[in-house]
Amino acid sequence: MFSNNFRKYLVAILLILTYTALASEEEDLYKLLDVPRDANLKDIRKAFKKLAVKLHPDKNLDDPDADAKFAKFARAYEILKDPESRKQYDLFGDVGNQASKQKYQSYTYYRDQFGIYDDDPLIITLTRSDYELNVLDTSQVWFVNFYSAQCHHCHELAPVWRRLSSELEGVIRIAAVNCEEDWALCRQLGIMSYPTLLYYQKDSTMYEGEKYHGERSVDALQNYVLNRLTSKAQIITRNEWDHEGLRKKSWLLILCTEDGSTCLEQDTVQKLAAIFEGLLPLGMIREKDLSESIFQNYKEYPVVFWEVKETGNDVTTAAEVHSIDVLETKDIVKQVLSLLPDPQFLNEETFQDIRTQLRLGSEEPWLLCFYMGAATELNIQWKRLPAWLPNMKLGLIHCGRNTALCASLHVSHYPAWGLLKIGGAFEMYHGREILHEIAAFARESSKSTNLHALSPADFYNILQEGSVWFIDWYAPWCPPCKKLLPEMRKASQHFEPENVQFGTIDCTLHSNLCSYEGIRAYPTTRFYNGSKIHHFHGVPNEEGIVEFVENMLHPIVINLEEDNFIQLERKSEHELWIVDFYAPWCGPCQRLMPVWNSLAKQLSNFEFVKLAQVDCTQQSNLCHSQNVKSYPTIRLYPLGSEGLNTVAMYNGHLDVMSLKKWTLSFMPGAEVKLLNDKKFRKAVLSEHDKYIPWLVDFYAPWCGHCVHFEPEFMLIAKNLDKKVKSGKVNCQEEHSFCHELGISSYPTVRLYLSPYEYREITKQIATEVVHEVNAIIERRFREEL
């Protein structure tokens, strides 16, 4: 007999196959433009331009159907270029009006003006969706050209910009933004004229681009960039070379005479320093004798690669010297990289052996590159990676020779990158083809051994086994998804796989599964625990994910159902219950979820307080019996009443502060006394036989921080009841008195241990304040013994 879970699995597969058959009848917009489903915007634009130049009605006047044919391609481009319409298409198919008249530009526009930098591999076309992700780069300088396709000066600059990108290849990143298409981004950045050039230093913010005002020539632009670079060649003396151990590591050396006649041009030196930064240190030697001792023929070939090789645990002092017989920057770079060790080429058998070893405890992860065709240029680029990833192995896999392996790993474009982790998990890279970023991904992913890329078969195995998973359903091109993936990696490192595992499902590769599972937005994140599914609605960062998963694993909010609702019905008069009746699809309910968990944590010191929630989609009969008619409905069952006899309804703001203040008003405990000048002097500053310490909050009604702190102070007072007395002073009404006491900012909290002694409490979180006050009082008590 088959289990119920297995039956569900078979039904799901049949439904997906049916969906696939139906979907195949609809024209696929990706196939129409001949691009893969995970294509980026630049690839989509290039594909459309190629079709536009060939099939435009202005070019095919003899074809009466040319207009209708071309309109299909134009419409496909309009849908796929916009992240929102593309998401809707990926999720639900083409639901628009196919018969509507599609507007498009003239043939000359597509030939001469459309995507003027799309055919330039060295110029990165940025859009509003990825601009911030790109320019906020700790490792790269960016130079961005904001242009309009209709602007004459922009077209004059285009060949200059292309040549500049070639001259500065590997030195900085050259980019372009089409303000005709991305006008919102250009307006956000204050771009008022075209072309506008902004220069971003490493680790700049989005609004820190420096505007270029100089001549728009290649030489002027290049000098502007080189003058701002911070990478320099290190001047090496004989003493440093012989006695400070510099000769014991590999160098790219420029050997000169004292008069500098054999040195490279300064621009070339500056470029090499930037290109090899983090890979090989660049040194310059200006002493004739030292230059000759390193390489006798240095006057003819002034550039050498000083290669020191490791022998076991010791590094030899002897080195092999490779003369570099070229002088142009690109040629030097290519020749030096060709001298570095080659990466390892893998096939399916070696891949499986490596994965088995990683599952058995091997501690060396592998960064893999999947490619087609010749790997000459790719191989040279790979030479940069070992210096950045010293504790990782590198491998190349030719997908033409290993088709089954690449298909099983869902490799859909080339080159593609993936990481095989300790423990055997595999994760694909979905970022830009930039080595610095690929290396950063590898470092972060290698730590995230608890994060797996999942296939439909993997997903249904999870359902069948009933194991605990937190899964991110995403699309690689989706900007919020790109931001969430690194946060998922970091969050996964907080948990052991025995407790919860993390997974990702690429909806561009597995669109049928995503549709069947009701994925209607990217990213969608869900917590799976057996048959129960919980939607994530917290802050989409490491901290928010960790907090959500912790709450799922160790819930502090009681989930009420028909089976256990009797707990509330039998509530004693010594308990206070707050219940949230909600529906998962309700927007305000989703925003309330993290607030509700936070409220439960903050009230957890009060054992008589119980926070609960009821999912009214799952418990419709229960909600109907409680006359719940809207969501969320928040009800409080107070102290002093039994069961459901007494109830208070909440109608305030759905934030922690408001809910906490409302809840605290139903709780007994210390009274916070409002003190004026006269009352303060009598209660706090006067001597008494048995002086009880006072905790006083000095505030102003107009102060936003004071308003937020008010419920915290109420909570503090209740926690410290019988240890201290609590009071507050309105410094707007008692301005002179507060000035006399030296109160200069709000809120100010003081603990008066006597009329003559106080401690200022700088913390404003209830648990921290309570801990600090208790520590001060206990220390004072010990001192008095």
Image (cartoon, rainbow, N blue to C red):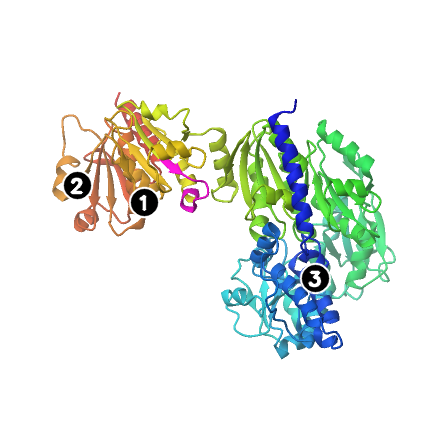
Residue 267 image-quadrant placement:
bottom right
- In this figure, which residue is indicated by the disc labeled 1? 708
In depth, the one of 194 and 443 nearer the eye is 194
- In this figure, which residue is indicated by the disc labeled 2? 675
Residue 715 image point, x, y percent: 29, 35
Magenta span includes 420: no
Kindly report the distance in space between the C-alpha atoms of the residues bearing marks 2 and 3.
Answer: 69 Å
What residue lies at 14% left-to-right and 29% top-to-bottom?
688
Q: Tell me if 100 is positioned left or right of 457 in this view.
A: left
Q: Residues within 10 Å of mark 1 (few under 14, many from 20)?
A: some
Amino acid type for the residue under numbered disc 3: Gln
Query: Circle 2 sits in a helix, a strand or a loop, which is it?
Result: loop
Please tell me whether mark 1 or mark 2 is closer to you in this view.
Answer: 1
Kindly report the distance in space between the C-alpha atoms of the residues bearing marks 1 and 2.
Answer: 20 Å
What residue lies at 59% left-to-right and 51% top-to-bottom?
92
Question: Which comes before the other along the chain, label 2 or label 3?
Answer: 3
Amino acid type for the residue under numbered disc 2: Leu
Q: Are marks 3 and 1 in contact (CB under 8 Å)?
A: no
Magenta-colored span: 580-590
What residue lies at 16% left-to-right and 37% top-to-bottom?
685
Residue 726 image point, x, y percent: 22, 35
In depth, the one of 511 and 234 nearer the eye is 511
Label ID, residue 270 = 3
**Number of numbered discs:** 3
* Quadrant for the C terminus in the image: top left
* Quadrant for the N terminus in the image: top right
Question: Which comes before the other along the chain, label 3 or label 1?
Answer: 3
Question: Which comes before the other along the chain, label 1 or label 2?
Answer: 2
Q: Are marks 2 and 3 in contact (CB under 8 Å)?
A: no
